[in-house]
Each structure stands twice: as structure tokens, then as C-alpha cells.
Image: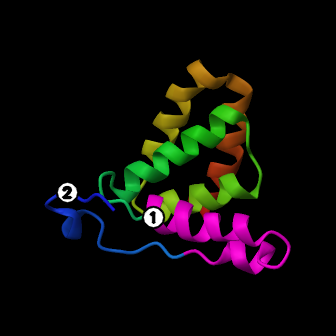
């Protein structure tokens, strides 16, 4: 896994995911393994992008696709946990609204309001 010189200081926590195996391990074991070991194991633990930035990128990608289900809420909660403030998420969603669509921003804001008021 590529790392830069200061990776220990930039990303001190390791992301561990077992949801794929828990939900789909017997039904779709390869997909579950890719989800837990590759997506969350290797990709989310790559230290070239800090977790806060990675969280913002993920929220933007889901917003751009119009995905506003529980996965978006999970990633909004993860963004908050990794230091994204209410003002930052508001600015990001507002900016992306001009490129991805106003209705998508409304949907994201409805979930973000829940997350940042909890």
C-alpha cells in the first residue's frame, strides 16, 4: 500500500469493516471480501488522502449519483466523526449543488441536518 513519509501522523486510525461479511458473506462471499478487505481495508486505509478529505469526497460522489439512502447517512456520520464541521458540509453540498443538481443537495441537506443535530 503506497504511503507518504508522514502517514502515521496523518491517518493514525485504521478503518476496519466487517459489514460486507456480516450481510452478504454466505450469499456473495467475493463481493463481501472486496467490500471489507479492498474498499474499506486497502482503499480507506491508504494514507495519501487524509480521512476527513476522503469522507468529503465520498459524500460528494454519493450526492452526484443521487444516492441518498442509509449509505449516505453512514458516510455523513463518518464525515462528522472525522472532523467535518456543519459549516464545511454545508459549503461542500452548496458548491456541489451547482454541478450535481439542486434536488440532490436538498436530499443531502435533509440527512446532514439529522446528523449534525444528533
Is residue 32 on the magenta stretch? yes
Q: Residue at x 55, y 39 (%)?
A: 60
Residue 100, placed above or below residue 70: above
56 sits to left or right of 76: left
Q: Which mark is residue 74?
A: none
Q: Residue at x 50, y 26 (%)?
A: 95
**Residue 49: x percent and y percent?**
33, 51
Q: Which mark is residue 42?
A: 1
Q: Residue at x 58, y 39 (%)?
A: 61
**Residue 22 seen from this side:** yes
Distance between the Cα atoms at labels 1 and 2? Answer: 15 Å
Q: Which quadrant of the rendered structure holds the C terminus?
A: bottom right
Q: Residue furthest right?
A: 27
Q: Which mark is residue 4?
A: 2
Secondary structure type for disc 2: loop
**Residue 75: x percent and y percent?**
59, 57
Where on the picture, by quarter, is residue 28? bottom right
Q: Which residues are magenta?
A: 17-44
Q: Main secondary structure of the magenta part?
A: helix
Q: Residue furthest front?
A: 30
Secondary structure type for disc 1: helix
Q: Is disc 2 surrounded by few (<14), some (14 to 19) or many (20+) residues within 10 Å?
A: few
Where on the picture, by quarter, is residue 3? bottom left
Residue 108, placed above or below residue 28: above
**Residue 84: x percent and y percent?**
43, 54
Tags 1 and 2 in contact by the CB under 8 Å rule? no
Q: Which quadrant of the rendered structure holds the N terminus?
A: bottom left
**Residue 86 seen from this side:** no
Amino acid at each position: 500500500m503506497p504511503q507518504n513519509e508522514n502517514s502515521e501522523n496523518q491517518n493514525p486510525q485504521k478503518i476496519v469493516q466487517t459489514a460486507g461479511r456480516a450481510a452478504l458473506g454466505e450469499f456473495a462471499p467475493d463481493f463481501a471480501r472486496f467490500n471489507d478487505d479492498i474498499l474499506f481495508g486497502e482503499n480507506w486505509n491508504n494514507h495519501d488522502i487524509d480521512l476527513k478529505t476522503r469522507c468529503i469526497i465520498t459524500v460528494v460522489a454519493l450526492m452526484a449519483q443521487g444516492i441518498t439512502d442509509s449509505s449516505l447517512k453512514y458516510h455523513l456520520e463518518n464525515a462528522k466523526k472525522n472532523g467535518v464541521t456543519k459549516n464545511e458540509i454545508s459549503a461542500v453540498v452548496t458548491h456541489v449543488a451547482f454541478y450535481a443538481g439542486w434536488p440532490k443537495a436538498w436530499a443531502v441537506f435533509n440527512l446532514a441536518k439529522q446528523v449534525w443535530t444528533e
